[in-house]
């Protein structure tokens, strides 16, 4: 009698694990319905089918767990019973967690659908009110235009504020560079021979500029006379 009982336990556990895997796969499909935009006003056929499949899987797993518990109660092997008790507890915890997950996803879909239906109702009421009250609709339109203009002004003010901030930053940087330059010149003036060296460099630059300018003028005269 012990061998058939062990075989039955193994087969039932295999079925339970298979149904758990199927449940998790369907949860992935079902959870995507909660994030679908826009949400349909009423449950779609796919949603109803997935929810029905999940409910059926949970019920089948509950039945399998009950059969596993009966087999465990009839087992006379204390060592095997301790391991089986642990396995049975895990299946029960997984089933309870999946029942909670199903309830949470179902509540999320219902909440999303209620929000979508509420927004649709509000829009319909607003459109009906505007159709029945053209003056109010015109006033609402003007208010909307005013809000859009105010938003444009706020954006422009933000851009100008950023431009002023950048300009001020450039001014601070210029002042910093000027201060550094003054410090460098002041430090250089205190080193013996630096002023004379810088003077000679400046004179050489001026001489080179005069020579280059004279050469360019000569070239223009030659071109002018021989053209």
Image (cartoon, rainbow, N blue to C red):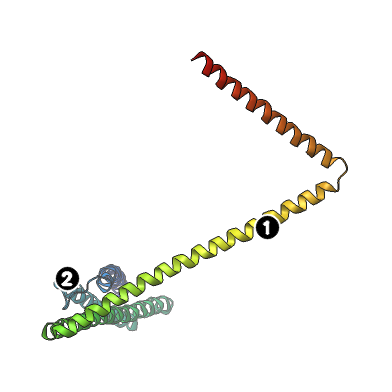
Res. 125 visible in picture = no
Residue at 25% across, 68% down: 29
Res. 105 visible in picture = yes
When asked about the image quadrant of residue 64, the answer is bottom left
In the foreground, 196 or 150? 196
Labels 1, 2: front one? 1
Residue at 38% across, 75% down: 87
Residue 170 position (above or below residue 93): above
Instruction: Locate residue 42 relative to residue 109 in the image: left or right.
Output: left
Instruction: Locate residue 133 relative to residue 186 in the image: left or right.
Output: left
Please state the horizontal and vertical placement of residue 209, each as a whole percent of the image: 67, 30
Separation of marks 1 and 2 at Cα, in angstroms? 68 Å
Q: Tell me the SS state at disc 1.
A: helix
Q: Residue furthest left?
A: 132
Residue 18 position (above or below residue 107): above
In the foreground, 93 or 120? 120
Mark 1 nearby-residue class (10 Å; few <14, some 14–19, many ≥20):
few
Instruction: Locate residue 88 relative to residue 180 in the image: left or right.
Output: left
In the foreground, 18 or 53? 53
Identify residue for label 2. Answer: 46
Identify residue for label 1. Answer: 176
Label annotation for residue 93: none
When asked about the image quadrant of residue 88, the answer is bottom left
Q: Tell me the SS state at disc 2.
A: helix
Mark 2 nearby-residue class (10 Å; few <14, some 14–19, many ≥20):
few
Q: Residue furthest right?
A: 192
Q: Return the disc, 1 or 2, that comes first in the chain's sequence.
A: 2
When asked about the image quadrant of residue 180, the answer is bottom right
Please state the horizontal and vertical placement of residue 192, each as a whole percent of the image: 88, 43
Please state the horizontal and vertical placement of residue 194, each as a whole percent of the image: 83, 41
């Amino acid at each position: 009698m012990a061998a058939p009982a062990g075989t039955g336990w193994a087969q039932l556990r295999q079925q339970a694990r298979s149904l758990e895997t199927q449940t998790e796969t369907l949860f992935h499909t079902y959870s995507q319905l909660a994030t679908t935009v826009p949400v349909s006003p009423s449950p779609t056929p796919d949603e109803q089918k997935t929810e029905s499949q999940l409910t059926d899987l949970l019920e089948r797993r509950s039945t399998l767990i009950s059969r596993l518990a009966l087999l465990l109660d009839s087992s006379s092997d204390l060592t095997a019973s301790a391991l089986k008790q642990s396995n049975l507890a895990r299946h029960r915890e997984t089933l309870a967690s999946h029942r909670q997950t199903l309830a949470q996803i179902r509540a999320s879909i219902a909440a999303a659908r209620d929000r979508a239906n509420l927004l649709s109702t509000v829009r319909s009421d607003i459109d009906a009110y505007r159709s029945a009250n053209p003056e109010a609709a015109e006033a609402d339109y003007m208010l909307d235009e005013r809000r859009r203009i105010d938003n444009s002004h706020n954006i422009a003010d933000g851009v100008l504020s950023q431009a002023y901030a950048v300009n001020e930053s450039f001014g601070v940087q210029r002042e910093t560079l000027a201060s550094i330059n003054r410090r460098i010149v002041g430090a250089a003036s205190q080193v013996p021979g630096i002023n004379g060296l810088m003077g000679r460099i400046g004179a050489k630059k001026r001489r080179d500029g005069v020579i280059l300018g004279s050469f360019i003028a000569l070239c223009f005269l030659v071109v002018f006379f021989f053209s």
